[in-house]
Structure formats: structure tokens, C-alpha cells
């Protein structure tokens, strides 16, 4: 009889072990599966481009490429307002012809013509020129490496803006074209190099902007004979005399594709909104490719490096992913988001860890057991508050409140601990020598509460005259005008407090469990040997429970890294890279929540957001693994509880 | 949850706008809406947050005419409309900006024809400051210098209020910036027209809805923000604007919007998938007709936006033929 019971329970044990193992395995498989699914969406970002040569070139593409003529004259249709045409005349001069059409309210058209030559003295012979797509600017390159820029946007005659010596070695500039958006100028030269230039204001030169070299793109081995800008994005097709075509992208500086036309190219044009490239060779034969370039703007350097974007004065990490127009240069640096995630986590942990750990130590070692039985569940209920509620309160209630009483807050950071210390020193003789003191042992905490509140009230009251005396009545203004620090209403302090509120219960409850589980005989032995209660707690209990305490912190850390709603609602989601306490941040998780609904399915932004999810996953994975390894070491070193 | 809280805010906001809106009169020549028979079914609308309240009011009015119609409205930003139309999860795609080339292309890839754009109301995008801010007017050049880090309009950077001529206690205060999230058409429109396609400063606090922009500005004396005029509350005021610095300043009122003098006036749209030569599903068509009727445009006024004149409404109805 007895042996059957033993057999039965052994069988049950084995069964339970199997179920637990299977469950654990299932969790691991599920987590890896999720990672795999997310990664699968983001991987196509790095697929290389392909081109498929069309077997037959349709007639309309033939007609399109026949229209392309970049010889000694270029013209642009300017919609309803007319047209403009520039021609290279003998004598190294450019001639501008402009047709203006003005419509009045009744629909009557008035046409005016304008024709003039640009007679500015030039540093060399014009070897090539380019009229901007919007007819607003005119560029010329010379045979000795100079770039010349005119402004044609006003009503009068064109104005020479600048001449720039682009290349010191006097190389011949052989091809020019503006990249989509008409802001950057691509320059091809006889050495086969392709560079892009744009007007940049240099420090010290005031508001004047001068052409500067921004990107060096993958070039050719032969002189560049022609540059063609894609109408779809910031890509360029680069041609040489032998019929080699390279597709390159400006922002990512990537070589996308290399194509061979097999014969010298006479004319080339993009069709089908940049999805087809048609070229015709000098013998009149046309070749067309269907291009498939999924995500040209993505490269490791655009995702994680500093990039010099159009209109910026220096290379920067920027996240600004979308705009209402197509000629926008997407800025998808993940660095500000990673930075924001770490900043939020760090500040939250700085706020939460001391409070939660010291709270746990007190609760487990010093508090009266029946009071502990109430406090612990109460703190655990804190964890059940939905994070959206915390975020909402933080953004709409705490942030304006803090805005008004910022000095009071800082003072309370100093005054509350100080007053508590004073109170403790005052209480000590009473605690040991009076009956009341002995009876209140384990309930001291209740006596602290009024002191905390009184101190908070006191620091609020004191802060008003103090602010008036020291900071001219307005600390934020003082910060801005003397220290140059901008105080933002939605700042990192709000995040630290709100995120800390979410993290504290987790750290507290796990750490408290770990500390309470240290066997009584250890602390009893320590006390019996004459150690004080504090010495026992700090030197005996805490080291024994260190692995558990460490797990508590790491789990809190993991929660803070991934927390979305609080960060989303309590910050302004400003992708700033600054450690200042007084401005906001944008975290990876909040960014995904903000932008995923707008992201076109399987577009670059969509996949980049998934990539940032992978990154977030990896971050927490790496941190947790490191933490677990550390915990194992602690366990070996300090104890088994 | 987020949406609900934003909606709750909207409710208070909308009450306040009624007073502002009473002044505008709907064009008497607009057709009155006649209910027809056989209209029932489900309608789903996903898109602009700017149009969110308006769509809700229209849906309410429409449901009164046709109790058998179910309408669901979701407004997270104009950029959510094209994906929803393409995926077929919505029949109506309200947008506060026209579709981009790429969005039209994606739409065409799925359906084989272009989306149909129906203008349903006029909006003057307003630049809001706190009600206690004494500023009289701003030019778009200055607004660009406040909001943009690329400053394509060419003025030097503006960071404090005294740089735009505000005196007193506010003068030395740094300007606190509020804006919309990038899904919103308002974000795109403002970027295109005020910033000349430049980039926003990193310090612009991106809010998930127009109501939270206005709420943020109302709570912060040194703040400036932009959103559709329909979200104005008593805590903020819309600054009269001029295009160029020292140019003529225009208030964001109906007359200036109609005459095209207010520099940030725009049309609000509803996009639908309509196969050329075939009529729209009856519910969708009737909804658009309702929106463009006298009643529908009265709702526009009630929500604080500007109604279309009769001729423009008739022009938009032609797109449904």
C-alpha cells in the first residue's frame, strides 16, 4: 500500500516536471517566434536592389526618351505660370528666355517674354550647366573645377550668387543635375567622381549660404557623362561614355545598382514615376529596365550615424520620418530614440531604486508584521494601476503642477531626507527609554508620514520667498537667462516620477520577498552575537538576499525600458539628444506607438519601426541575460536564498 | 484609451467653439438634404483627427435620417486614411491634406484607379498662443523662425518672445513649442506651407491630438502651437497672421478664408474609392451628399470650421457623378 502511494507520487512528480519543462520550452519558442516575426518584417530593409531588362521597349517609352535632349539648351515648363529656357551661347555666356503667363480673375491671360544674357565674368569655360526643375536656380560647371550659381527666382534678371572652386586640382566638371526637391546639386567630373553640394551657412558668415560639399557618392572609373535625378526619391543615375549606369542614393551614399547599356548613351529618362529607366544609345536603340529598389534611403549609416541632411548646417542624428510632400528627405536615425529610451530608464531608476529598495529593507526587517501585512498589498496594488492612467495624470496634472512649483520640488528633495534625519535623531532617545517608544517599535513609519507632509508644505511655502530672493521670482527664467538651460513643461523629471511610480511596486515587492526569505536563524545568530538590528540588516540579510534584490532591480529596469504609454503621454515626444533634466525625450517604444498607425504598410518607415522593435527586444534581451549571469555569480558568492 | 481621453477633451473643447462659430452664416443657396429610401448598412471612417469631431456630428445627423445605418469613426491622423482605404477597412477617408504621390500610387496599385477626393469643409489652420499673451500678430516668416531648425524662409532663429516684439513679463521667456504628431495632415500642411518643407525643431512637443495641443498651450503661458481653428478654446487665442514679415495681417475669419487672404486656409477632404463610371455604394454617396448639403454645412459651422459656398459644394458633388 505504502509503495503504491510512493509510486503514485513519483509518477506525479515526473509528470509535473515534464509539464513544467514543456511549458518553459513553449515560452522560449514563443519568444523566439515573436522575435523572428518582427525581424522578418524588418529584414527586407537591407535587400539589395534589382533591375529587370524589359524584352521589348514599349512605344510610349520610346517617345519619352526621344524627348530628352540635354545639349546646349534646357527648358522647363512651370505649370500655369509659363516656361523658362536657358541656352549656352558662344562666348561662354548663358542666355535666359522666360515666358510669363499671368491670369487675372476673369481668366484673361497675359503673356510677357523676357530675354537676357548672364554676362558676369566667369572663372573658366562653362563645360556643363543645369537649370533647376522649378526654374528658380541655374548652375554651371567649368572645365577647371569651378561651380557657379545664379538665382533666377525674382522678376528681374538673374543674379549671380557665387562662384565656388569645387575642386583644387582643376578637374573638368562634366555633368550637373539637381536631386529631387531642387535643393542639392549633384556634380560629376572627369575623374568619375560624383559629389553632391548644397547651400550651407557657415559659422561666422551670417545668414549667407554657400555651396558646400556634402556627400561623396560611389563613382565611376570613367568620366561621368551624364547625371539623371530620380523623380521618386533622392537617387541618381550616373552614366559614363561606355554605357555603364550606376544608381546611387544621396542620403545613404549607397550604390544601389550597376547596369550595362552596352553602347554609349545618347538620351536617358526615368518613366513610370522612377520605376523604369529608359536609355537610348547613339545608334538609336532603346533599352528599358524595370527597377526594383525597395528601400534606397536605408543603410547602417543613416540608421545609426550622423547624416548631413538637406538644409542642415552640420551632420546630425535626426528622427523626422514623414512629411506631406514627396520630395522630402526622410530622417530615420534611431540614435535619438535609443538615447531617449536610456535617458527615461536611467532617470526613472535613479528615482525608483533607492525608494523601492530602502522601502523593502525597512518593511522586511523593521516594520511590525501586521502593518507589513497591509503595506505590501497596498504597494502591489500600485502596480495594477494602468500605465495609461499614470501617463495621463503625469502629462495633464503633474507636469503643470511641477511647472508651477519646481523650486519647491527641488527643495523637498533636500529637505525631506534632512527633516527625517532630524526626526530620527530626536526620536532615538525616546524609542529606547520610554514605554511609548518601545510600544511603537515597528510603527515608526507612521510617525514619519506627518513629518514628510509638513516638510513638503514647508518647502512649498519657503520656495516662494526664496525664489523671489535668489532667482528674481522665476527659477525657470533664471535658468534660461543665466545658464541657458531651457525648462520644458513636459520634462524628464515628470517622466522619472511617473515611470518610477510604475517601477517602484515591482522592485519593492520582489526585493521584499527576497529579503524576507533570508532564514531567521541567520539574523537571529547575528543579533545573538551582539550585532545591532541595522548591522544585521545591512551586513547579513542584504548580502544573503543580494541575488534576489538584483533580480528585482533588473526586472524593474526591463519594465522601464519597454514602458510605452507613460512615456508617450507624459513627454512631448521630442527626439532630443541632451541629458538635461529639464527637457523631454522620445523613446523607442513610444515612437513605435506614435508612428505605426500612419506608416504605409511595408514602406520604409513601417519596416524601420519594426527594426526599432527588434532593437528594443535585443536591448532588453542583452540586459536581462547579462543580469542573469551576474545574478548567478552573486548567488555563488553571497548565498543561496 | 488614448482616443477616449482625447475625445473627452474634445467634448469640452467643442462646447467652447459654438460661441465662436455663430457669426458665420451658411450659404443660403446650398441644397437642402432630401432623404431617399433604401439606405442602410455599415460605414466606417478612418483618418484625420482634425475632421474627427465633424465626422462624428455628420454621422449623428446622418443616423437620424437613416436609423439602419451604422457608422464607426476613428481619427488618428490623415496618414491613417490611405492605408485604411487600401486595406478596405474604411469606406471614408477624411484627410486634412491632399494625398501624396506615393499614397495615390499605392491606392492605384490595389484598385487600378485613382482615389476620389471630395472637399467637404474649409479650415483656417490657426497659430495659437496662451490667452494672456499680449502678442498682436505674427508673420509666417517669424512662425517659421520659431518652429523650424532649417528656417527655409530665411529669418534668424527666434527663441524668446521679445524677438517677436512681446514686452512685459513674457519678454525674456523662451518660447515653448507644441505641435501635432507626424501622422496628422495638420503636421504635414504646416510643414509644407509655413516651414516651406523645412524640418521642425527637435523641441516641438508632438501631441497625439489637436485638443492636446490646445490644452498644452492653454496651460503654458509661454507656449505657441498650431491646429485647426475648430479646436479653439477660451484658454487660447488665434494670432492674426501675415505671410511676409511686415505684410498685411489677416485674422482667421470666414471672409479672409473665402477671399484667400488668410495665409493658412485649406480645404478638408474625404477620400473615397470610386470606380470610374460606376456610382458609389448608396450609403457612402448619401453620406457625402449629406455632408455637402445645407444641413451638413451647418454642422461644419457648429464645429467651428468654415462652410463651403454653394458653388464650391456643387463642384465637389460633381466628383461623385
Image: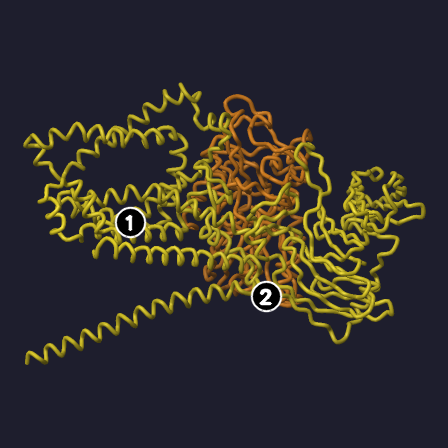
Chain colours: A yellow, B orange
Mark seen at residue B36: none
User: Pointer 1: what residue?
Assistant: A507
**Mark drawn on residue A47:** 2
Q: Which residue, as the protein is rendered here, is positioned at the far right?
A: A90
The chain ID associated with circle 2 is: A
Q: Position of residue B321 (x, y in %)?
A: 66, 61
Q: Secondary structure at mark 2?
A: loop
Q: Is disc 2 in contact with disc 1, using a CB cutoff of under 8 Å?
A: no
| Label 2: few (<14), some (14–19) or many (≥20) C-alpha neighbours in 10 Å | few
Instruction: State whether residue A348 is above or below residue A49.
Output: above
Residue B32 visible in the shown view: no
Any part of residue A517 in sight? yes
Few, some or many C-alpha atoms within 10 Å of disc 1 (few <14, some 14-19, many ≥20)?
Answer: many
Say which of B312 and B7 sits in front: B7
Foreground residue, A632 or B113?
A632
**Above or below A472: residue A375:** below
Side of A202 where A78 appears, left or right: right
Q: Name the residue: 85% across, 59% down.
A: A69
Dot 1: element:
helix
Query: On the image, which quarter does residue B155 sit in?
Result: top right
How far, Cα to Cα, is label 2 from label 1? 43 Å
Amino acid at each position: 500500500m505504502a509503495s503504491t502511494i510512493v509510486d503514485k507520487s513519483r509518477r506525479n512528480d515526473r509528470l509535473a516536471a515534464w509539464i513544467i519543462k514543456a511549458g518553459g520550452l513553449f515560452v522560449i519558442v514563443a519568444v523566439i517566434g515573436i522575435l523572428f516575426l518582427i525581424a522578418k518584417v524588418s529584414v527586407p530593409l537591407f535587400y539589395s536592389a534589382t533591375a529587370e531588362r524589359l524584352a521589348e521597349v514599349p512605344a510610349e517609352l520610346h517617345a519619352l526618351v526621344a524627348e530628352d535632349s540635354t545639349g546646349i539648351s534646357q527648358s522647363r515648363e512651370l505649370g500655369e505660370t509659363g516656361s523658362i529656357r536657358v541656352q549656352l551661347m558662344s562666348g561662354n555666356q548663358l542666355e535666359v528666355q522666360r515666358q510669363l503667363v499671368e491670369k487675372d480673375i476673369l481668366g484673361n491671360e497675359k503673356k510677357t517674354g523676357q530675354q537676357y544674357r548672364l554676362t558676369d565674368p566667369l572663372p573658366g569655360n562653362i563645360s556643363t550647366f543645369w537649370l533647376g526643375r522649378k526654374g528658380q536656380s541655374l548652375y554651371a560647371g567649368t572645365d577647371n573645377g569651378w561651380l557657379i550659381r545664379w538665382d533666377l527666382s525674382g522678376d528681374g534678371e538673374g543674379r549671380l550668387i557665387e562662384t565656388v572652386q569645387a575642386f583644387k586640382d582643376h578637374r573638368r566638371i562634366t555633368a550637373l543635375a539637381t536631386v529631387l526637391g531642387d535643393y542639392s546639386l549633384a556634380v560629376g567630373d572627369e575623374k568619375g567622381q560624383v559629389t553632391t553640394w548644397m547651400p550651407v551657412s557657415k559659422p561666422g558668415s551670417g545668414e549667407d549660404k554657400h555651396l558646400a560639399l556634402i556627400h561623396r557618392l560611389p563613382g565611376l572609373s570613367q568620366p561621368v557623362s551624364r547625371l539623371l535625378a530620380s523623380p521618386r526619391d533622392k537617387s541618381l543615375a550616373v552614366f559614363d561614355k561606355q554605357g555603364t549606369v550606376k544608381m546611387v542614393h544621396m542620403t545613404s551614399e549607397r550604390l544601389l545598382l550597376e547596369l550595362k547599356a552596352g553602347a554609349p548613351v545618347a538620351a536617358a529618362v526615368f518613366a513610370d514615376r522612377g520605376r523604369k529607366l529608359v536609355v537610348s544609345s547613339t545608334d538609336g536603340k532603346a533599352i528599358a529596365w524595370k527597377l526594383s529598389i525597395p528601400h534606397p534611403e536605408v543603410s547602417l549609416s543613416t540608421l545609426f550615424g550622423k547624416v548631413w541632411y538637406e538644409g542642415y548646417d552640420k551632420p546630425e542624428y535626426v528622427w523626422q520620418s514623414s512629411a506631406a510632400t514627396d520630395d522630402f528627405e526622410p530622417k530615420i536615425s534611431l540614435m535619438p530614440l535609443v538615447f531617449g529610451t536610456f535617458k527615461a530608464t536611467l532617470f526613472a531608476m535613479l528615482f525608483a531604486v533607492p525608494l523601492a529598495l530602502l522601502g523593502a529593507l525597512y518593511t522586511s526587517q523593521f516594520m511590525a508584521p501586521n502593518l507589513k501585512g497591509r503595506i505590501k498589498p497596498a504597494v502591489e496594488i500600485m502596480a495594477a494601476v494602468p500605465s495609461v492612467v499614470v501617463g495621463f495624470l503625469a502629462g495633464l496634472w503633474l507636469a503643470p503642477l511641477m511647472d508651477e512649483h519646481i523650486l519647491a520640488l527641488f527643495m523637498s528633495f533636500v529637505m525631506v531626507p534632512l527633516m527625517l534625519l532630524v526626526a530620527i535623531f530626536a526620536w532615538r532617545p525616546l524609542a529606547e527609554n520610554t514605554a511609548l517608544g518601545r510600544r511603537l517599535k515597528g510603527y515608526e513609519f507612521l510617525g514619519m508620514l506627518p513629518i514628510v507632509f509638513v516638510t513638503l508644505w514647508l518647502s512649498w511655502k519657503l520656495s516662494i520667498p526664496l525664489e523671489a530672493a535668489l532667482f528674481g521670482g522665476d527659477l525657470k527664467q533664471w535658468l534660461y537667462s543665466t545658464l541657458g538651460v531651457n525648462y520644458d513643461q513636459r520634462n524628464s523629471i515628470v517622466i522619472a516620477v511617473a515611470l518610477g511610480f510604475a517601477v517602484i511596486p515591482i522592485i519593492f515587492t520582489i526585493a521584499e520577498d527576497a529579503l524576507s526569505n533570508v532564514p531567521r536563524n541567520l539574523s537571529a545568530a547575528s543579533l545573538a552575537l551582539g550585532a545591532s538590528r541595522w548591522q544585521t540588516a545591512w551586513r547579513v540579510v542584504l548580502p544573503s538576499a543580494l541575488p534576489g534584490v538584483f533580480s528585482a532591480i533588473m526586472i524593474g529596469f526591463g519594465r522601464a525600458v519597454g514602458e510605452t504609454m507613460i512615456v508617450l503621454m507624459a513627454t512631448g515626444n521630442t527626439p532630443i539628444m541632451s541629458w538635461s533634466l529639464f527637457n523631454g525625450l522620445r523613446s523607442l517604444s513610444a515612437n513605435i506607438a506614435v508612428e505605426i498607425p500612419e506608416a504605409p504598410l511595408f514602406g520604409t518607415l513601417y519596416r524601420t519601426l519594426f527594426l526599432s522593435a527588434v532593437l528594443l527586444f535585443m536591448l532588453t534581451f542583452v540586459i536581462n541575460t547579462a543580469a542573469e549571469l551576474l545574478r548567478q555569480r552573486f548567488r555563488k558568492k553571497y548565498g543561496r536564498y | 484609451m488614448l482616443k477616449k481621453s482625447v475625445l473627452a477633451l474634445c467634448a469640452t473643447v467643442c462646447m467652447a467653439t459654438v460661441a465662436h462659430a455663430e457669426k458665420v452664416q451658411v450659404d443660403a443657396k446650398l441644397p437642402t438634404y432630401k432623404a431617399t429610401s433604401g439606405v442602410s448598412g455599415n460605414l466606417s471612417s478612418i483618418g484625420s483627427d482634425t475632421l474627427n469631431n465633424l465626422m462624428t456630428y455628420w454621422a449623428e445627423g446622418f443616423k437620424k435620417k437613416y436609423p439602419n445605418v451604422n457608422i464607426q469613426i476613428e481619427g488618428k491622423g490623415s496618414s491613417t486614411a490611405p492605408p485604411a482605404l487600401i486595406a478596405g477597412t474604411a469606406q471614408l477617408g477624411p484627410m486634412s491634406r491632399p494625398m501624396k504621390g506615393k499614397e495615390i500610387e499605392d491606392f492605384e496599385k490595389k484598385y487600378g484607379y485613382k482615389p476620389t477626393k471630395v472637399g467637404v469643409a474649409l479650415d483656417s489652420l490657426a497659430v495659437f498662443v496662451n490667452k494672456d499673451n499680449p502678442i498682436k500678430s505674427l508673420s509666417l516668416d517669424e512662425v517659421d523662425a520659431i518652429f523650424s531648425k532649417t528656417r527655409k524662409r530665411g529669418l534668424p532663429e527666434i527663441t524668446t518672445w521679445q524677438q517677436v516684439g512681446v514686452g512685459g513679463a513674457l519678454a525674456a521667456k523662451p518660447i515653448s513649442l507644441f505641435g501635432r504628431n507626424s501622422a496628422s495632415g495638420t503636421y504635414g500642411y504646416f510643414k509644407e506651407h509655413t516651414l516651406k518643407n523645412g524640418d521642425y525643431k527637435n523641441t516641438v512637443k508632438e501631441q497625439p491630438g489637436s485638443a492636446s495641443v490646445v490644452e498644452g498651450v492653454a496651460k503654458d503661458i509661454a507656449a505657441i502651437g498650431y491646429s485647426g481653428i475648430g479646436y479653439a478654446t477660451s484658454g487660447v487665442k488665434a494670432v492674426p497672421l501675415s505671410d511676409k514679415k511686415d505684410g498685411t495681417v489677416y485674422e482667421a475669419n470666414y471672409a479672409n478664408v473665402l477671399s484667400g487672404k488668410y495665409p493658412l486656409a485649406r480645404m478638408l477632404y474625404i477620400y473615397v474609392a470610386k470606380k470610374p463610371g460606376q456610382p458609389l455604394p448608396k450609403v457612402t454617396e448619401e453620406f457625402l451628399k449629406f455632408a455637402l448639403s445645407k444641413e451638413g454645412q451647418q454642422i461644419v459651422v457648429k464645429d467651428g470650421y468654415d462652410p463651403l459656398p454653394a458653388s464650391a459644394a456643387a463642384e465637389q458633388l460633381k466628383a461623385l457623378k
